Amino acid sequence: MPDLLWDDVRNFFDPDLMGALPDVCVAGTSVEDWQAVFDLVRSSGWTREYAEGEVARALPSAVEVLSRPADAETVDLRVRPVSDVLAIFRPMSAEEIDLDVDLRELQGQAEVDTLCGFLCAIGRRLGKPVVMTAEGDYGNPVLGFDPAADCVVLLAEPQLIALVGRDS
């Protein structure tokens, strides 16, 4: 049984309502948590590309990434759990794991199932909640991995997102 059904959550995957790159976050993290995510990415078989600025490099340790000078090139870790689903990690702070997902690629039940599996893998590895919000709307999570339930759950009503999006 899927964690979320496409017909129930399609508003959360509408780029016009949520922004094309909604934010996914794990709060209260550490360098060790980032390393656990890097290890998960390495061991999962997911396609990945790490870049500093425009230069592709091998994925270093979390300590190396997070101890870079403040004025260093930005870092992106692009991960594809499957070929048509993209997650972009942006390691900027040890205290929070931030990533974006591309809603233009998440347009059906199979893709929602992939996203749920991806969020569950991260949440289980860390033993922490993983939440998704509309792009730039950090205080209002819409769905996320709940460690107590051991699955992805709704954290907002999809119909309310549709109404807010239409009024904007």
Image (spheres, grey):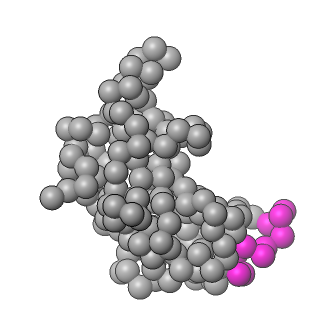
**Which of the 4 image quarters holds residue 3?**
bottom left
Classify residue 8 as left or right of residue 126. Answer: left
In the picture as drawn, the residue positioned furthest to the front comes out as 148
**Residue 115 visible in this rendered orientation of the protein:** no
In the picture as drawn, the residue positioned furthest to the top comes out as 167
From the top left corner, tell me how far across and down residue 99 is, in percent. 54, 57
- In front here: 80 or 38? 38
Residue 7 inside the magenta-drawn segment: no
Q: Which residues are magenta?
A: 63-72
Seen at 59% across and 42% down, the residue is 138
From the top left corner, tell me how far across and down residue 21 is, in percent. 49, 45
Q: Is residue 8 above or below residue 152?
A: above
Image quarter of the N terminus = bottom left
Q: Is residue 70 above or below residue 58?
A: above
| Magenta stretch secondary structure, dominant | loop
Q: Is residue 37 above or below residue 129?
A: below
Seen at 47% across and 49% down, the residue is 132
Seen at 40% across and 58% down, the residue is 145
